[in-house]
Amino acid sequence: VGTLSGRFMDRMQKEEAAPEGASKLGFSSLHYSVLESQCVARVVVRRSGGDLDAPVSVGYATKDGTAVAHLDYQPVQGVLKFGPGEVS
């Protein structure tokens, strides 16, 4: 079983403090579990506050914890983009 937790969101907020009045992004749940037999983990990111009619984007990447990239999971990175009015 692999796990994602709220500590990742805490790290993201500390590393990239948003300007005052900007939208805030966070996970919809503080805990996600994935069985090894499952091939995909679905993580929902929600947007709140700020100007929801303006587009916003944030970079993301997986990082080793108790699981090791290429051995336990396929690493991914990219940019998550929210269009005008999009909140999840």
Image (cartoon, rainbow, N blue to C red):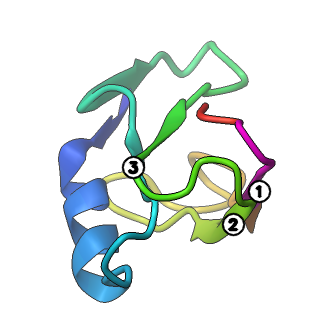
In the rendered structure, the answer to whether residue 59 lies left or right of residue 66 reads right
Point out which mark residue 2 bears.
none
Q: Residue drawn 60% across and 34% down?
A: 87
Q: Residue drawn 70% across and 25% down?
A: 40
Q: Is residue 77 visible?
A: no
Frontmost residue, 83 versus 38? 83
Frontmost residue, 57 versus 34? 57
In the rendered structure, the answer to whether residue 7 lies left or right of residue 63 reads left
Q: Residue drawn 71% across and 59% down?
A: 54
Frontmost residue, 20 versus 34? 20
Residue 35 position within the rendered picture, expressed as x and y whole percent measured from the top left = 48, 16
Q: Dot 1 lies on which element?
A: strand
Asked if 25 appears above or below 79 in the picture, the reply is above
In the rendered structure, the answer to whether residue 70 lies left or right of residue 51 reads right
Q: Dot 2 lies on which element?
A: strand
Of callouts 3 and 2, which one flags the residue occurring earlier in the amino acid sequence?
Answer: 3
Q: Which residue is mark 1?
A: 81
Q: CA distance from mark 3 to mark 2?
A: 14 Å
Of callouts 3 and 1, which one flags the residue occurring earlier in the amino acid sequence?
Answer: 3
Q: Is residue 36 visible?
A: yes
In the rendered structure, the answer to whether residue 61 lies left or right of residue 32 reads right
Q: Amino acid at mark 3?
A: Gly
Residue 13 position within the rendered picture, expressed as x and y whole percent measured from the top left = 28, 71
From the image, state whether disc 3 or disc 2 is nearer to you.
3
Point out which mark residue 57 bears.
2
Locate the C terminus by quadrant.
top right
Badge 2 vs badge 1, beta-carbon distance below 8 Å: yes
Point out which mark residue 49 bears.
3
